Image (cartoon, rainbow, N blue to C red):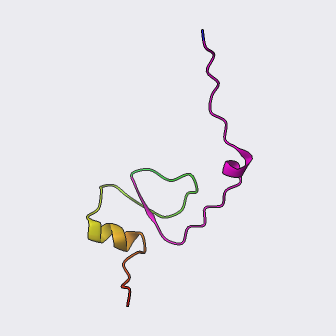
Amino acid sequence: MVKIEPYQKSEEEMNMAAMVETMFSVREKPWHGLGEIIQEAPTSEDALRLAGLDWNVI
């Protein structure tokens, strides 16, 4: 029988900074606790706005 060990995060993963300016999550709070939590999946246009990516390249 093969013994399977539970996944252990590396030290790099445990110390990783969120480095988030704007974002959203659907229904669940992300590990870093940042961003706006919404209850339903947004349209593409709304997702870009909620994520802070609604800018134009000129």
Quadrant in the picture for the C terminus? bottom left
Q: Where residue 17 appears, x then y in whole percent? A: 66, 61
Write down the quadrant of residue 2 in the picture.
top right
Q: Left or right: where does residue 44 sit relative to residue 1?
A: left
Q: Of all residues shown, which one is farthest toward the right?
A: 11
Residue 4 relative to residue 12: left or right: left
Q: Say which of 38 and 41 sits in front.
A: 41
Of 39 and 32, which appears nearest the observer? Answer: 32
Looking at this rendering, what residue extends furthest in the top direction?
A: 1
Does 1 sit above or below residue 17?
Answer: above
**What kind of secondary structure does the magenta stretch mostly adopt?**
loop
Residue 39: x, y in percent? 33, 55
Counting from the top left corner in percent of width and height, residue 23 is at 46, 66
Left or right, residue 25 beside residue 1: left
Q: Is residue 10 magenta?
A: yes
What span is colored magenta in the figure?
Answer: 2-26
- Residue 23 in magenta stretch: yes
> What residue lies at 69% left-to-right and 49% top-to-bottom?
14
Which residue sits at x=61%, y=21%?
4
Position of the N terminus, as image quadrant, is top right
- Tell me what residue is drawn at x 44 percent, y 50 percent: 28
Q: Quadrant of residue 50?
A: bottom left
Q: Residue furthest left?
A: 43
Q: Position of residue 36 (x, y in %)?
A: 44, 64
Taking 25 as reference, is 23 above or below it? below
